[in-house]
């Protein structure tokens, strides 16, 4: 079979096609007049939407305004709809809880958190990080009463009362039937802590709550966008949960809709890449229906939300009353912070990776990089870590290069076998295997070192995009090592590439090309076997794939691959120039031929099977 080659005409063809595509994308851009028309139309649509919202949604007055006006139609309507829970002195408005790092705002109507803001973090546009804001989250309990009403706490008014428990702030929200009969939400905030204790309990409602009907807690949240690339952020935005005695599971990060019903839930994490909203419970939820809906279709600066999460779980009555101790966590998806809550195991919500890859990421790379970055600039820490990793893997690189050198030395003899037995594929294979055995060479010895590096490769692939330590840390021209770097913004978007040019992926692609030239160059010096991939094509394809794939990935990851391949190239050059000697390798192979290795069971079995097949072939010809 003739080997396919990339000649000059093919290269020119690819360049022309790429140029035509760019020209078409540029030509398809709207004119200034069209942009103005589109802007005017969009303004009309937004104005109409605001009018609709103004009619459909009531205006909430944040100043406490009593609703218990005498003979008020609104009060009468409210009391009629909620029945016994109409006993209230509550008013519209909100109550604030805050410490040094977290700000929460709780609405008197519904008793739920309507704003959660991180005090020490901002997004890529320097806007404070909100996990709950402008109605993106709802938390309520749906229940039935003994007089056959179906109520939801979102419709009830809670009376707030504030107190202190030592240094802790305590907010009690009560939806009352009487002074001594109520449903309570209790929030307790500690100083300098992202975790807020949360208790749902009832008092004196035995006989008021209908125990024959389910009491369902429902928590909904739409993830607010925080990164400049919403596709990249959405890739690491995911619903994660701890269930069945400690098992960690996740809903799909890419499906339009993923739904599961799970049992024995310890905690639920609505992760939004670098920040998480987590609900944990001390007594576990026996069963919960979970769903995650993808809200991102394409890269867009206008898209504001990543995913919509929903959890619905039943609460159990104890002696006719509700009593559920829980915890809210609104904070960074940072291993240093989440590891403080060992009893809850919240650190497991971080996407370290699965199996051995996650173990390497969590227990080797994360603490190692944390140590280096404690006294080095963050970008320099990546470079130093890369150098140490590559030096640690240099014996593997040596083994791989040694195998290639041995195969190169044997090339003339393999070529002679192929020419002599070109019409007898089975015999040719037998002779080749005999040669390898006599010379003490294994063609698989070059592949095994590469396979040994895969756990390292994948672990680092997960480490850089999810390491909170890299978030908004700059290095050289990269403003944020956890996101892509930009040296030029394109006036159009290229499919699979984006609307910008990142320099670190370009440097990494160039380094990969030279590395592939060195490694596949030796492979191409040997005769390519039928059915084997075209190594020259792979040598050109790999850097291009790297360039496109990593243009929207974390610049820290591209920096690692650039430095890693650069170091590998220098190591291989050093091995070739100062360590390996092809004449000595050839002499050693000749000595090995005089003392061939004893066949192992696998080699013996393979030889016998091939000899039997050859004998049967000859018998069939007769």
Image: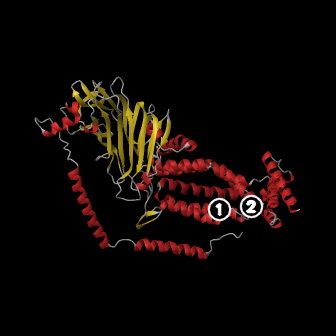
Q: Which residue is mark 1?
A: 518
Residue 523 appears anywhere in the view: yes
Circle nearer the N terminus (1, 2): 2
Quadrant placement of the N terminus: bottom right
Residue 484, position as x, y percentages in the image? 45, 57
Residue 587 appears anywhere in the view: no
Q: Is residue 489 depicted above or below 160 in this figure?
A: below
Q: Which residue is mark 2?
A: 408
* Residue drawn at (30%, 39%) of the image: 113
Q: Nearer the viewer, residue 60 or 57?
A: 57
**Which mark is drawn over residue 136?**
none
* Residue drawn at (56%, 75%) of the image: 13
* Residue drawn at (31%, 71%) of the image: 34
**Alpha carbon separation for disc pair 1 and 2:** 13 Å
User: Relative to residue 12, is residue 397 drawn left or right?
Assistant: right
Q: Residue furthest right?
A: 622
As helix, strand or loop, the secondary structure at mark 1 comes to helix
Q: Is residue 382 depicted above or below 569 in this figure?
A: above
Residue 165 figure quarter: top left
User: Relative to residue 1, is residue 112 drawn left or right?
Assistant: left
As helix, strand or loop, the secondary structure at mark 2 comes to helix
Q: Residues within 10 Å of mark 1 (few under 14, many from 20)?
A: some
């Amino acid at each position: 079979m003739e080997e396919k080659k990339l000649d000059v005409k093919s290269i020119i063809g690819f360049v022309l096609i790429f140029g035509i595509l760019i020209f078409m994308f540029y030509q398809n851009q709207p004119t200034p007049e069209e942009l103005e028309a589109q802007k005017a139309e969009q303004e009309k649509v937004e104005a109409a939407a605001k009018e609709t919202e103004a009619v459909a949604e009531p205006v909430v007055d944040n100043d406490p305004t009593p609703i218990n006006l005498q003979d008020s139609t609104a009060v009468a309507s409210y009391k009629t709809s909620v029945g016994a829970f109409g006993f209230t002195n509550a008013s519209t408005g909100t109550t604030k809880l805050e410490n040094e790092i977290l700000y929460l705002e709780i609405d008197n109507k519904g008793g739920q958190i309507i704003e959660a803001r991180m005090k020490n973090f901002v997004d890529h546009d320097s806007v404070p990080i909100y996990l709950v804001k402008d109605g993106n989250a709802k938390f309520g309990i749906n229940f039935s009463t003994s007089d056959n009403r179906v109520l939801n706490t979102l419709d009830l008014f809670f009376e707030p009362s504030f107190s202190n428990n030592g240094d802790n702030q305590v907010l009690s929200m009560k939806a009352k039937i009487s002074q001594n009969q109520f449903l309570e939400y209790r929030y307790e905030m500690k100083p300098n802590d992202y975790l807020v204790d949360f208790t749902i309990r009832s008092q004196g409602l035995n006989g008021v709550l209908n125990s024959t009907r389910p009491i369902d807690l429902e928590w909904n949240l739409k993830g607010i966008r925080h990164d400049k690339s919403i596709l990249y952020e959405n890739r690491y935005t995911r619903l994660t949960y701890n269930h069945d005695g400690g098992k960690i599971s996740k809903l799909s990060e890419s499906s339009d809709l993923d739904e599961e019903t799970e049992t024995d839930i310890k905690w639920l994490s609505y992760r939004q890449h670098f920040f998480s909203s987590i609900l944990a419970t001390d007594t576990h939820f026996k069963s919960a229906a979970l769903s995650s809906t993808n809200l991102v279709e394409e890269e867009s600066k206008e898209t504001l939300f990543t995913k919509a999460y929903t959890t619905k779980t039943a609460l159990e009555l104890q002696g006719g009353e509700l009593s559920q101790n829980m915890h809210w966590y609104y904070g960074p998806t940072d291993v240093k912070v989440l590891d403080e809550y060992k009893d809850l195991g919240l650190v497991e919500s971080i996407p370290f990776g699965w199996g051995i890859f996650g173990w390497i990421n969590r227990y080797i790379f994360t603490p190692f990089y944390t140590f280096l970055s404690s006294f080095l600039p963050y970008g320099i820490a990546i470079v130093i870590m890369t150098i140490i990793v590559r030096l640690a893997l240099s014996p593997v690189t040596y083994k791989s290069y040694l195998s290639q050198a041995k195969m190169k030395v044997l090339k003339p003899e393999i070529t002679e076998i192929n020419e002599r037995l070109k019409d007898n594929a089975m015999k040719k294979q037998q002779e080749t295997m005999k040669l390898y055995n006599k010379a003490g060479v294994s063609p698989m010895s070059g592949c095994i070192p590469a396979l040994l590096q895969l756990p390292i490769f994948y672990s680092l692939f997960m480490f850089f995009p999810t390491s909170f330590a890299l978030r908004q840390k700059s290095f050289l021209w990269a403003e944020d090592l956890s996101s892509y770097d930009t040296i030029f913004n394109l006036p159009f978007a290229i499919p699979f590439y984006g609307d910008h040019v990142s320099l670190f992926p370009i440097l990494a692609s160039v380094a990969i090309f030279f590395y592939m030239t060195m490694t596949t160059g030796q492979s191409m010096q040997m005769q390519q076997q039928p059915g084997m991939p075209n190594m020259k094509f792979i040598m050109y394809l790999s850097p291009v794939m790297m360039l496109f794939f990593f243009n929207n990935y974390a610049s820290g990851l591209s920096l690692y691959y650039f430095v890693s391949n650069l170091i590998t190239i220098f190591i291989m050059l050093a091995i070739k120039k100062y360590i390996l000697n092809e004449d000595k390798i050839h002499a050693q192979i000749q000595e090995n031929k005089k003392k061939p290795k004893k066949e192992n069971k696998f080699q013996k079995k393979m030889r016998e099977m091939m000899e039997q097949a050859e004998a049967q072939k000859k018998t069939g010809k007769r």
